[in-house]
Image (cartoon, rainbow, N blue to C red):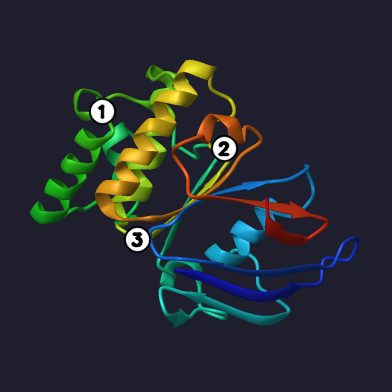
Amino acid sequence: MIKLNTFFDYPEMPMYFDLHIKPQQKVAIIGESGAGKSTLLNLIAGFEKADRGEIWLNGENHSYSFPAERPVSILFQDNNLFTHLTVQQNIALGIKPNLKLSSIELERMNEVASAVGLQALLHRLPNELSGGQKQRVALARCLLRDKPILLLDEPFSALDPQLRLEMLNLIEQLSNDKKLTLVIVTHQPDELNGKIDRILKINAGRVSDF
């Protein structure tokens, strides 16, 4: 569940977000560049701080909590992989910055890698992967954190249409399997037909149902 009643006083365009997303709902966010889509996700994730108002996530007030304390994972367009680390190590960063996983954590990591089709690539470096495979690594890192809310900020826009469809199908399947609340920013909502429950539009820092 995501519930916001939040003011963000961006100098050029003050923003106000008032929305309620139900648990396990899949929601697409659309709008022009600069309208506030990424700002909304960053407020939910805790990378931006609201000036006034409240942010409730899964029934708890997270208006002032740090990003690591929130029940949220976020996947950006830039997959943010470390080029000197293997696929396995990049995934493991989701839960252990020192990369020292317990046997239980290692088992979980292998399960997540398998779920996104990376089991055979765990010892490769990022420069040995395709664009779609790199995004799978970033997605696996998010999923390993095992948070109930998954935010996606145009994560597949650099991929070709066939790969985008493949990744969107995977996201839909994983969201259903893990009972995630999903919010995805996109410029191509038609690709999400049949995969989401609701479309929200952001215009000049205000959000409304589309």
**For mark 2, does the 10 Å Cα neighbourhood hold few (<14), some (14 to 19), or many (20 or more) residues?**
some
- Residue 40 image position (x, y, % from top left): 65, 60
Furthest-left residue in this view: 103
The quadrant holding residue 140 is: top left
Q: Is residue 207 left or right of residue 14?
A: left
Indicate which disc, 2 or 1, sits on the residue closer to the N terminus: 2
Secondary structure type for disc 2: loop
Amino acid on which the number 1 mark rests in the picture: Gly
Q: Which residue is mark 1?
A: 117
Q: In which quadrant is the N terminus drawn?
A: bottom left
Residue 133, percent across and down?
Answer: 38, 25
Q: Based on the displayed image, in which of its 4 quarters is residue 179 positioned?
A: bottom left
Question: How far is disc 1 from disc 3 in space, using C-alphas?
Answer: 20 Å
Q: Residue at x 56, y 37 (%)?
A: 78
Quick check: can you spot residue 126?
A: no
> How would you rate the neighbour count of disc 3 (Cα within 10 Å): few for under 14, some for 14-19, many for 20 or more?
some
Q: Marks 2 and 3: CB-CB under 8 Å?
A: no
Q: Position of residue 149 (x, y in %)?
A: 41, 60
Tell me the residue at 38%/39% (across/down): 171
Q: Earlier in the sequence, mark 1 or mark 3?
A: 1
User: Residue shown at 59%/31% (left/top)?
Assistant: 190
**Would residue 114 be found to the left or right of residue 4 on screen?**
left
Amino acid on which the number 3 mark rests in the picture: Lys
According to the picture, the residue beneath numbered tag 3 turns out to be 147
Q: Contact, CB < 8 Å: mark 2 with mark 1?
A: no
Q: Quadrant of residue 160?
A: top right
Q: Amino acid at mark 2?
A: Gln
> Mark on residue 77?
2
